[in-house]
């Protein structure tokens, strides 16, 4: 086993462990942290495959921005974990069936192998390892030419997710005391203090005072 293969198996093992802990962690904050660990290991795998742009983009975009936003949202939502896990065992058979189906599909794809590379793919592979090759330039041309519509669809989905996260964090909660700054600025002394004119207290007559002492 060479140097690259050893790191590949190491990063893959940590990635599988982190992905498993994402769906089994009881605390949502811990699940988000495990997901960040999984993204970091995936970025390391991209670097091993000499896709530096994808690895750095995964670290900067997902670990540096998206996952931090997810962590803040999870911490501010005050999620009731017991309520979420109430129907866990009820939906477990369906989850196992879907997981088994996905596993069978992956095994079928890996078992049959990938088709042999064509002449164009071989030329592209040789050009990729050329000293003057720029994988960022080639990736940009491919994404914004052949995969333009999927890129736009992914951008719309991310925009909707961002708006939903902001709407969830700005929802009105009944257990918090919030004050509108505009109302505070418009406060007047007359609204908070009212002076009432009350008659002065009169002294009790002497006879009434004697009866009270008796």
Image (cartoon, rainbow, N blue to C red):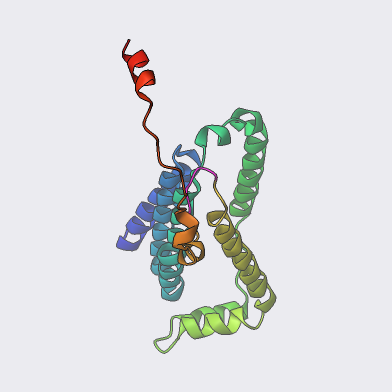
Magenta portion: prevailing SS class: loop
Can residue 163 be seen from the camera position used here?
yes
Task: Report whether 102 appears left or right of 29.
Answer: right
124 and 183: which is toward the camera:
183
Q: What percent of the width, then of the height, locates residue 198?
A: 46, 45
Which range of residues does the magenta coloring cover? Answer: 174-179
Q: What percent of the width, then of the height, locates residue 4?
A: 34, 62
Q: What percent of the width, then of the height, locates residue 74?
A: 48, 50
Q: Quadrant of residue 200?
A: top left
Q: Is residue 72 magenta?
A: no
86 and 138: which is toward the camera:
86
Number of on-image labels: 0
Q: Quadrant of residue 201?
A: top left
- Residue 42 vs 135, above or below: the answer is above
6 and 37: which is toward the camera:
37
- Residue at the image position 51 percent from the left and 78 percent from the top: 125
- Position of the C terminus, as image quadrant, is top left
101 and 172: which is toward the camera:
172
Can residue 70 be seen from the camera position used here?
no
- Residue at the image position 63 percent from the left and 64 percent from the top: 160
- Residue at the image position 53 percent from the left and 83 percent from the top: 138
- Residue 19 vs 135, above or below: the answer is above
């Amino acid at each position: 086993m060479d140097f690259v293969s050893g790191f590949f198996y190491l990063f893959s093992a940590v990635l599988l462990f982190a992905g498993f802990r994402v769906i089994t962690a009881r605390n949502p904050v811990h699940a988000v942290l495990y997901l960040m660990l999984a993204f970091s290991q995936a970025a390391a795998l991209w670097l091993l495959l000499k896709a530096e742009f994808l690895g750095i983009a995964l670290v900067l975009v997902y670990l540096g921005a998206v996952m931090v936003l997810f962590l803040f949202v999870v911490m501010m939502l005050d999620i009731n974990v017991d309520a979420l896990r109430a129907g866990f065992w009820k939906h477990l058979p369906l989850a196992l069936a879907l997981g088994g189906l996905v596993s069978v599909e992956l095994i079928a794809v890996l078992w049959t192998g990938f088709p042999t590379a064509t002449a164009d793919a071989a030329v592209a592979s040789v050009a990729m390892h050329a000293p003057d090759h720029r994988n960022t330039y080639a990736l940009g041309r491919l994404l914004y030419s052949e995969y333009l519509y999927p890129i736009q669809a992914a951008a719309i989905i991310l925009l909707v997710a961002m708006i939903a996260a902001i709407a969830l964090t700005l929802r009105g909660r009944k257990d918090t005391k919030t004050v509108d700054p505009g109302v505070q600025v418009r406060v007047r002394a007359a609204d908070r203090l009212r002076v009432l004119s009350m008659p002065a207290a009169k002294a009790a007559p002497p006879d009434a005072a004697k009866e009270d002492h008796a």
